[in-house]
Amino acid sequence: MSLVSEFREFAVKGNVVDLAVGVIIGAAFNGIVKSLVDQVVMPPIGLITGGIDFSKLEWVLRPENPATEEVEKVAIQYGAFLNTVIQFLIVAWVVFLVVKGVNALRRQQAAQPDPAPAAPTPTEALLTEIRDELKARPNP
């Protein structure tokens, strides 16, 4: 098997395509979550905490010197980190709810009884009758 044909077989398998779709949807979902956190969740939290913009919170280790043009400021930006943690928690919660829903559907489907087998067709019934009669005959 050539390298190209082996790669083609790998690339068109259902799992690889499903994974690619999941990654693309996940990347798009990241934008939604970022918007939700930055524009919906954090403003009320900032209002409750006295108008603090969490994304601007930082601990300055070395301030900038206004006499130089270089950026010399060194700071730990823990506000941006808090926003990222909140985004992660939202994504984790949504994924948990999706997995929980899928598992509930699977349990519900597994709990349903299997449908009763269909009644034999007239041809099958006749063949079964012939087979039973042949078995009942004494061997010569």
Image (tube, rainbow, N blue to C red):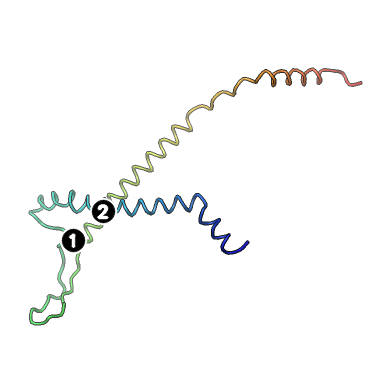
- Percent position of residue 53, x then y: 13, 58
Looking at numbered disc 2 in the image, what kind of residue is underneath it?
Gln
Is 76 displayed left or right of 26 in the figure? left
Distance CA(mark 1)–CA(mark 2)? 12 Å
Looking at the image, residue 42 lies above or below residue 132: below
Determine which residue is flagged by label 2.
Answer: 87
Q: What residue do we see at 54% from left, 25% from top?
A: 115
Q: Quadrant of the N terminus?
A: bottom right
Question: Is 138 positioned to the left or the right of 109 in the image?
Answer: right
- Return the x and y of residue 62 as percentages of the image width and height: 15, 76
Q: Residue at x 59, y 24 (%)?
A: 117
Query: Would you call the spot at circle 2 few (<14 residues within 10 Å), some (14-19), or many (20 or more)?
Result: many
For disc 1, the marked residue is 79
Q: Is residue 22 above or below residue 117?
A: below
Type of amino acid at the residue the image marks with label 1: Gly
Q: Considering the numbered disc 1 on the image, is that residue within a helix, a strand or a loop?
A: helix
Answer whether labels 1 and 2 touch (C-beta < 8 Å): no
Which residue is drawn at the image coordinates 49% and 51% (left, top)?
A: 15
